Amino acid sequence: MIRRAFANAQRRFTTAATAAAQTQNAKTQEQLTHFGYKTVREEDKEQLVGSVFRNVASKYDVMNDFMSGGVHRLWKDHLIQTLNPGPNVKLLDVAGGTGDIAFRFLDYCKKVYGANNTASVTVVDINPAMLEVGKERSKRFGFADSGKIFFQEGNAENLVNIEDASVDAYTIAFGIRNCTHVDRVVSEAYRVLKPGGRFTVLEFGQVENPLVKGIYDLYSFQVIPRIGQIVAGDAESYQYLVESIRKFPPQPKFAAMIKNAGFTLVGQGWEDLTFGVAAIHTGFKV
Ligand SMILES: C[S@@+](CC[C@H](N)C(=O)[O-])C[C@H]1O[C@@H](n2cnc3c(N)ncnc32)[C@H](O)[C@@H]1O
């Protein structure tokens, strides 16, 4: 009798201890994330990403051309064509950095609808150094006092200065994979878009074709960090870049995340570019 009571008490203790250990493990797991191939605390990732873009801000645009042989320009042009904005569209370009998407959007609207169109864009980015380069470019391109482009420091995961249902279109190009909680970014996009609004993500993807993948991996890991060292004096940031691409969910998984946040997908929800090296994901807030 005493032995059975003791055995029962021991079982209860073991069960409780296991549950406590599992909770503790789950907590530890929750607080860890990836920074490229490194495992870091969630609270540290934002700062680490911040230092990458602070380091490369002044060389960011020229590095994009070197790394991609100019192909990033074609992808971004294609994003704007896909977006096909109307003459009064209010665009929010998040993680907009030095303004590549915003300037293309304004050029497109001017070309298609003339100088009197009322389209406008707000560029939000967490990194002041990237925004500074964007503001300088805005002056150089003649948009600074146009009242059509606004720059705002902010976090894609919590767009505190953007009201609910206030924008027609939301773009994020090569930004979302740098964010700690991708699901929060997508939910925020849903919140700020008006009904009928369009969510467009341009991001690196996973390449399926084995031959292309072999060449792409070789180029990414052997060449890009070296170009980073030569052009920007910073191999490490570009090592992070190529690693972060591999850690981002493959196209079908990311499309499912967009759908789970409430967006309606058209077809499979994404278009592969250059064998899936990049992809444009689209969701509509219906
Ligand atoms: C690779 S750059 C892309 C810039 C620009 N969209 C383009 O396509 O050239 C990534 C940008 O994401 C920004 N970023 C990273 N995490 C962010 C966050 N949580 N919220 C807003 N911007 C973020 C970085 O500061 C950086 O400017």
Image (spheres, helix red, strand yellow):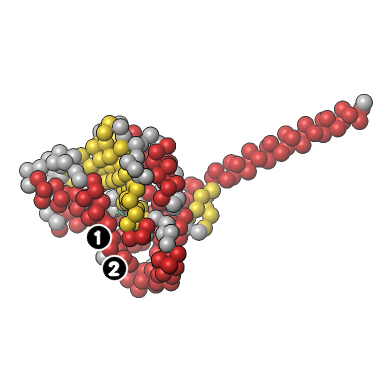
Residue type at tag 1: Arg
Disc 2 to disc 1, C-alpha distance: 9 Å
Q: Name the residue under label 2.
A: 69
Towards the viewer: 148 or 248: 248
User: Quadrant of residue 267 in the image?
Assistant: top left
Assign the N terminus to one quadrant of the image. top right
Residue type at tag 2: Gly
Dot 1 falls on a residue whose secondary structure is helix
Crowd class of label 2 (few under 14; some 14 to 19; many from 20; radius 10 Å)? few
Labelled disc at residue 15:
none
Residue at 73 percent across and 37 percent down: it is 17
Contact flag, marks 2 and 1 (Cβ < 8 Å):
no
Dot 2 falls on a residue whose secondary structure is loop
Towards the viewer: 256 or 101: 256
Residue at 45 percent across and 50 percent down: it is 249
Left or right: 34 in relation to 238: right
Q: Under 8 Å from ligand 1: the CB of mark 2? A: no
Residue at 25 percent across and 40 percent down: it is 169
Assign the C terminus to one quadrant of the image. top left
**Vertical side of 226 occupied by 34: above or below:** above
Left or right: 196 in relation to 118: right
Answer yes or no: is residue 250 visible: yes
**x and y percent of residue 115 in the render?**
7, 47
Residue at 83 percent across and 30 percent down: it is 8
Crowd class of label 1 (few under 14; some 14 to 19; many from 20; radius 10 Å)? some
User: Quadrant of residue 241 in the image?
Assistant: bottom left
**x and y percent of residue 188 in the render?**
36, 37
Q: Name the residue under label 1.
A: 73
Left or right: 215 in relation to 168: right
**x and y percent of residue 246 in the render?**
45, 58
Answer yes or no: is residue 233 visible: no
Towards the viewer: 266 or 141: 266
